[in-house]
Amino acid sequence: MATAAQTLAAVIDEPVTRTTLSILALIAVAFTLHLVTRRIVIPLGKKVALRTRAEWDEVLLEARVLQRAALLVPLLVFELGLRWVPGLPLALTELFTRLLAASMILVAAITGAAFLSALHALYLRLPVAATRPIKSYVQLAKVAVYIVAGIFIVARLAGQSPWYFVSGLGAMMAIILLIFRDTLLSLVASVQLTNNDLVRVGDWIEMPQFNADGDVIDIALNTVTVENWDKTVTVIPTHKFLEHSFKNWRNMFEGGGRRIKRAIHINTSTTRFLTDEEIERFSRFALLKDYMQEKLAELKEYNEKHAKRDGSVIANARRLTNIGTLRAYIVAYLRNHPKIHLGKTFLVRQLAPTPEGLPLEIYVFSKDTKWVNYENIQADIFDHILAMVPEFGLSVYQRPSGRDLTAAMADSV
């Protein structure tokens, strides 16, 4: 009796044992092929890619396209092997088939996204990439890939046609537009920024609304990242570039000149006419020699015609002034400066007098546009001008400090 029961149990368990062993064997084969692909095939592909002159194969490896595609190998083995597993219930076979199909769709989407990243990396090596960034488009394509993959995965798990779910998206469009509002706005802004060439990676921009002042280091679908001069990072939504104004300094760098616009304030009480001794001394200045000769000849001719009665009276004749001579000296000094761009706006002018004195403004462009070099050039110019002001009998206006008032009170006692 016991022997008959054992024989019956063995007959019942035999299909179960064969099914389990078949599944274990299938797992072993899939795992082995996966290891062979990852440890042998892909490293061999890397060696071949390094020996070729083409760039695309190396970029594919760097983007890990092959590594992600390798996940399809064990999934394909499982899908093909399930047909040969004996005794597997039909319902379980259908469940495994759906899960494997959904997994393969997901792996295909991940691989496709990696392939898009590789294409973007190849595009960045082209000269046109500096002026036409496509990162936002690549990100949008990845979103589309994952959305399509998600629809197919849900459809496969539910055993329905993908069009069954697509037809239901119309009713959900309002919700989708609400959820992806910023993304859609950023897409439109990205197209505008790219097509109109408003912003590039590497541009120096100022956007006070977001305390952004620095170089653009990344342009993505939803955000533009700016590294400020203090090394902080400001992340600005892309669509904000269409809602707010911003300053782009790119044209300044491409034009080869950076503007110097600064004024020194002359104490108006020190302005006067030049004496004969000063005229003689300034005539020996190399930068003023030609100016003094031309100006003296011009004034002599004018005075001979219009100052016939009494030229000794100041109001009856034209004379040289120390402020005008200083301005002429600055013009000559800047025209002979090797780092001043003479092909752009060149102006040394007087502005309207203020309570702080008479502004003498310099409006020129330096040849070097780099920030540090530009500041050094500007500082050297004004170091020289400020040191030369007393040579013309002038003084720079400066508000009196408490120490000045104390000294004045002490002198009055």
Image (spheres, rainbow, N blue to C red):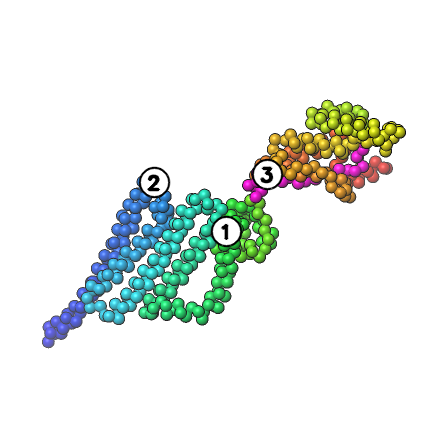
Q: Are marks 1 and 3 in contact (CB under 8 Å)?
A: no
255 left or right of 77? right
Label ID, residue 184: none
Mark 3 Cα within 10 Å, few/some/many (few <14, many 20+)? many
Q: Residues within 10 Å of mark 2 (few under 14, many from 20)?
A: few
Amino acid identity at mark 2:
Arg
- The residue identified by callout 3 is 257
Q: Residue at x 60, y 33 (%)?
A: 339
Image point 50% across, 51% down: which residue?
A: 194
**Of marks 2 and 3, which one's residue comes earlier in the chain?**
2
Q: Provide the secondary structure element on which disc 1 rests.
A: helix
Does the stretch in magenta take in 257?
yes
What x and y, as percent, mark residue 381? 65, 34
Q: Is residue 78 left or right of residue 251?
A: left
| SS state under label 3 | loop
User: Between marks 1 and 3, how big is the CA–CA gap?
Assistant: 25 Å
Q: Image quarter for residue 251?
A: top right
Which residue position holds label 1?
Answer: 194
Measure the alpha-carbon separation of dots 2 and 3: 41 Å
Lateral position of residue 113 relative to residue 357, left or right: left
- Comparing marks 1 and 2, which lies closer to the viewer? 1
What type is the residue that disc 1 sits on? Thr
In this view of the protein, which residue sits in the foreground, 112 or 163? 163
Image: magenta residue range? 251-274
The picture places residue 230, in percent across and down from the top left corner, at 56, 46
Residue 53 circle label:
2
